[in-house]
Image (cartoon, grey):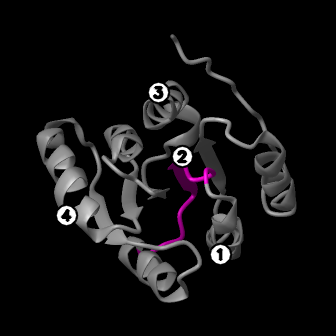
Amino acid sequence: AAQPLAQAIWARRSELCIPGLTAVELGCGCGLASLAVAAAGMEVLATDQDRAVLQSVTRLNLAANAELLAAPIHLEQLSFGDSAAFDAALRILRRPPALVLASDVLYEPELFPALSATLRGFAAASMAAGSCFWVVLAWQDRSPAKENAFLDSLADVLPMRRQLYIEEAD
């Protein structure tokens, strides 16, 4: 889902990627969505719960594509629901993110409460700072009823929801 997310962000970069504002990618893996956002001029904090992934795959991909970047990308370990890591993320960015991105973070329903806490935290910080706030998620449907229930549970902080379905080629 990282590739469709990066493509969707790039296609809508004039709406979503506002230079001077910041973004966070949750569960960044190779950092593809972070690359798209930073290439559009928005500072990004690319996070993953696995420090080894950040220090190897993510770091190598960012270095290989550094010439494309118009804004910096920072790397930080962040597990959903970890308040200390959340606070560290806000310190690194120096301002709350206006954009949160994530691909394939909805495959373990047992993580939904922690993911919700993280999204709510970023939303609260952004709204308190008077910033706009967007969340863009991409995932492969595995449990549509649970995924929709999770998204519905965030309606108070994410009142606008638009879903785009991208069919996978065989």
Compare marks 2 and 4 and give the one earlier in the sequence: 4
Task: Work out how far the residue at label 2 is from the one at label 3, CA to CA, in angstroms.
Answer: 15 Å
Q: Quadrant of residue 112?
A: bottom right
Q: Is disc 4 placed on a helix, strand or loop?
A: helix
Q: Residues within 10 Å of mark 3 (few under 14, many from 20)?
A: some
Magenta stretch holds residue 59: no
Compare marks 2 and 3 and give the one earlier in the sequence: 3
Q: What amino acid type should be assigned to the residue bearing mark 4?
A: Gln
Task: Work out how far the residue at label 3 is from the one at label 4, CA to CA, in angstroms.
Answer: 24 Å
Q: Which residue is mark 2?
A: 104
Magenta stretch: dominant SS? loop
Compare marks 3 and 4 and give the one earlier in the sequence: 3
Q: Which residue is mark 3?
A: 7
Q: Residues within 10 Å of mark 1 (few under 14, many from 20)?
A: some
Q: Which residue is mark 4?
A: 55
Q: Is disc 1 placed on a helix, strand or loop?
A: helix
Say whether marks 3 and 4 touch (CB < 8 Å): no
Task: Work out how far the residue at label 3 is from the one at label 1, CA to CA, in angstroms.
Answer: 26 Å
Residue occupying image coordinates x 33% and y 71%: 76
Q: Is residue 82 above or below residue 34?
A: below
